[in-house]
Image (cartoon, rainbow, N blue to C red):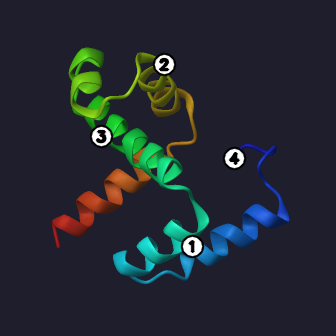
Amino acid sequence: MNKKIKTEAVDDLFEAILTLRNQEECYAFFEDVCTVNELLSFAQRYEVAKMLRKGKTYLEIAEKTGASTATISRVNRSLNFGNDGYDLAFERLKSKENI
């Protein structure tokens, strides 16, 4: 965990997110908290991460998502040297699909 972001305010935000029960509640909350562009950027990064994990090339990812190579590289660095947050989510979603 990055100690720079570990603050009481971030803890409170994450606690609020953890109370959300479904996609509709997530839409309501995140539309209030984020700008449209911020939310679309989050979604784009997540899509980039999924495609990188599937072995897609930067060119394929850029064409499909519209992400810059700088964004793709940043996400790739997170996948390889980050805190495994993306992979945790991918694994849990995969487990949920196999139920």
- Circle number at residue 50: 3
Is 92 rendered above or below residue 56? below
What's the residue at 25%, 63% (across, down)? 95
- Circle number at residue 70: 2
- Picture mark count: 4
Is 15 rendered above or below residue 21? above
Q: Element under label 2?
A: helix
Which sits earlier in the primary sequence, circle 4 or circle 2? 4
Separation of residues labelled 4 and 1 (CA atoms): 18 Å
Q: How many other residues sit within 10 Å of disc 3, few (<14), some (14-19) or many (≥20)?
A: some
User: Which of the two residues, 63 or 35, is positioned nearer the viewer here?
Assistant: 35
Q: Which residue is mark 4?
A: 1
Q: Which residue is mark 1?
A: 17
Which sits earlier in the primary sequence, circle 3 or circle 4? 4
**Three-letter amino acid code at disc 2?**
Ala
Separation of residues labelled 4 and 2 (CA atoms): 23 Å
